[in-house]
């Protein structure tokens, strides 16, 4: 057993004891006043019903990973030689173990993922079986599903796996998946957009640096962007669609491959991860309709109102939990100010940031008029030449795997139960408000 795995086991044993005590002593204590009918119909907003150890989201402050904000992560996590952005290996260690990593921990993960990165040919064959016109996210989930043949958990379970060892096989699947996802993603990119000219991995590079290399980008600025991108998109506590879906499917003891593929299908929705492609598409269309070049603030305003009048959302704005500018947006803005302050598309993103919130506020119904993570990412990628925006959600997916798979290890280590909330019919709801049936018993 490697030392990170041993360390995880120690942490898991400790937390297991604490959780059992908590449930034994306070299991019947209510953590809120109950659930309203509006919450049942409106996406269960505000209902606390999940445990996710890796990160916690505050509506006003944004995400904290094991207590560390994004600016703190950028300061404290190890960096690549001569780099300024945090390495995703370090964030993964922090999410899994709950402690800041040393340089050696990060190097251990880099080389472990390098060693485990071989992708069997049948995965590429499965991707090749799809038409070239298929969306990259479809290719990505097909690739993950094809890789499921390699699941240690599924194999061990079929042989008769003891409950207390579920976490161990999930850990193996997690490490293998994270090691292989960049290769699958890069394969999709090079297949769809670069005539199938694939690039072999460079074992000397860190995980994100090597991903950038396999995509075909050797610019150090792009590598730095990938490191930052992979860190800030990794986790957003447990209730978002991709994290919740991965957890839900995993609760049936579906292995990490099945669970992650399910989560990725959720990420591929336009109200979630696909918003990153929608943002840049929306900006480019606006620019084209206006005849190219820099739009004025008034022109952007008119375009936003047109979007709304057509019954569409303004992509990249709003959030189910956040109520302020997303610190993940601010981190990208900072990166842009440092590396590409004169980029035209970036300047448009900043003008949109000045224009959209007051308009959304005036609608009176939008709970959060501020930008989310997706409002900025596309402009940065376009700057470095990655213009194929349908691929953007795959980048998000590779990063999101870090968080949801670290969480899945914890789900198995804590022996969390099959998820099965109660549902009712609207007929039941009507009878309830008329006093004909009682509230669901505790
Ligand atoms: N543009 C226009 N209308 C918006 C809006 C936006 N950006 N954000 C919210 N609204 C509307 C909602 O559609 C809803 O309208 P109806 O009552 O007519 O249905 C109303 O305002 C209330 O919605 P809300 O409570 O403020 O927001 P929700 O929690 O229901 O939804 C969403 C949150 C992120 C889905 C929403 O803000 C949205 O659609 N944003 C645009 C798409 C987007 O950027 N998604 C990415 C979110 C971050 C993420 O997951 N990244 O991966």
Image (cartoon, rainbow, N blue to C red):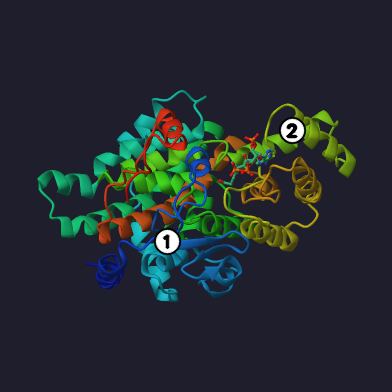
Label 1 – label 2 distance at C-alpha: 38 Å
| 1 vs 2, front mark | 1
The percent coordinates of residue 153 (x first, y second) are: 22, 49
Which quadrant of the structure image shows residue 392?
A: top right
Q: Secondary structure at mark 2?
A: helix
Q: Is residue 27 something that shows in the picture?
A: yes
Q: Residue at x 47, y 36 (%)?
A: 433
Q: Would you name the residue on which mark 1 appears?
A: 31
Q: Residue at x 61, y 64 (%)?
A: 61
Does residue 383 lie above or below 427 as drawn? Answer: below
Characterize the local packing of mark 2: few (<14), some (14-19) or many (20 or more) Cα atoms within 10 angstroms: some
The percent coordinates of residue 347 (x first, y second) are: 80, 50
Q: Residue at x 65, y 46 (%)?
A: 318
Which quadrant of the structure image shows residue 325?
A: bottom right
Characterize the local packing of mark 1: few (<14), some (14-19) or many (20 or more) Cα atoms within 10 angstroms: few
Q: Would you name the residue on which mark 2 appears?
A: 308
Label 1 CB-ligand 1 distance < 8 A: no
């Amino acid at each position: 057993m490697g030392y990170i795995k041993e360390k995880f086991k120690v942490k898991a044993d400790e937390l297991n004891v604490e959780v059992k005590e908590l449930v034994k002593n306070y299991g019947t204590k209510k953590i809120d006043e109950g659930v309203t009918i509006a919450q049942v119909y409106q996406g269960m907003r505000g209902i606390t019903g999940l445990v996710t150890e890796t990160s916690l989201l505050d509506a006003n402050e944004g995400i904290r990973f094991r207590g560390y904000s994004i600016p703190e992560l950028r300061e404290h996590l190890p960096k690549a030689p001569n780099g300024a952005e945090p390495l995703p290996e370090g964030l993964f260690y922090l999410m899994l173990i709950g402690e800041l990593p040393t340089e050696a921990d990060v190097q251990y993960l880099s080389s472990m993922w390098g060693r485990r990165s071989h992708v069997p040919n049948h995965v590429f064959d499965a991707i090749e079986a799809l038409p070239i016109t298929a969306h990259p996210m479809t290719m990505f989930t097909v690739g993950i599903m094809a890789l499921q043949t390699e699941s240690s958990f599924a194999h061990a379970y079929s042989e008769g796996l003891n409950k207390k060892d579920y976490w161990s096989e999930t850990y193996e699947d997690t490490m293998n998946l994270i090691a292989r996802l960049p290769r699958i993603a890069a394969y999709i990119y090079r297949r769809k957009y670069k005539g199938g000219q694939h690039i072999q991995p460079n074992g000397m590079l860190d995980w994100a640096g090597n991903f950038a290399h396999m995509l075909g980008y050797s610019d150090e600025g792009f590598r730095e962007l990938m490191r930052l991108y992979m860190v800030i998109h990794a986790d957003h506590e447990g209730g978002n669609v991709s994290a919740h879906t991965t957890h839900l499917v995993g609760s049936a003891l579906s292995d990490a491959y099945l669970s992650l593929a399910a989560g990725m299908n959720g990420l591929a929705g336009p109200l979630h991860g696909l918003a990153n492609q929608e943002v840049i598409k929306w900006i480019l269309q606006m620019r084209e309709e206006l005849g190219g070049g820099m739009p004025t603030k008034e022109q952007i305003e008119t375009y936003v109102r047109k979007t709304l009048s057509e019954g569409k959302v303004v992509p990249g704005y709003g959030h189910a939990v956040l109520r302020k500018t997303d610190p993940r947006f601010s981190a990208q803005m900072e990166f842009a100010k440092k590396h590409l302050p004169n980029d035209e598309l970036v300047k448009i993103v900043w003008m949109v940031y000045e224009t959209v919130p007051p308009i959304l506020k005036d609608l009176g119904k939008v709970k959060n008029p501020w930008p989310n993570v997706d409002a900025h990412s596309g402009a940065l990628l376009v700057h470095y030449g990655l213009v194929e925006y349908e691929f953007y959600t795959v980048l998000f997916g590779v990063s999101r795997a870090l968080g949801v798979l670290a969480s899945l290890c914890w789900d198995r280590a804590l022996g969390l139960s099959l998820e099965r909330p109660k549902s009712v019919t609207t007929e039941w709801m009507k009878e309830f408000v008329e006093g004909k049936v009682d509230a669901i018993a505790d």
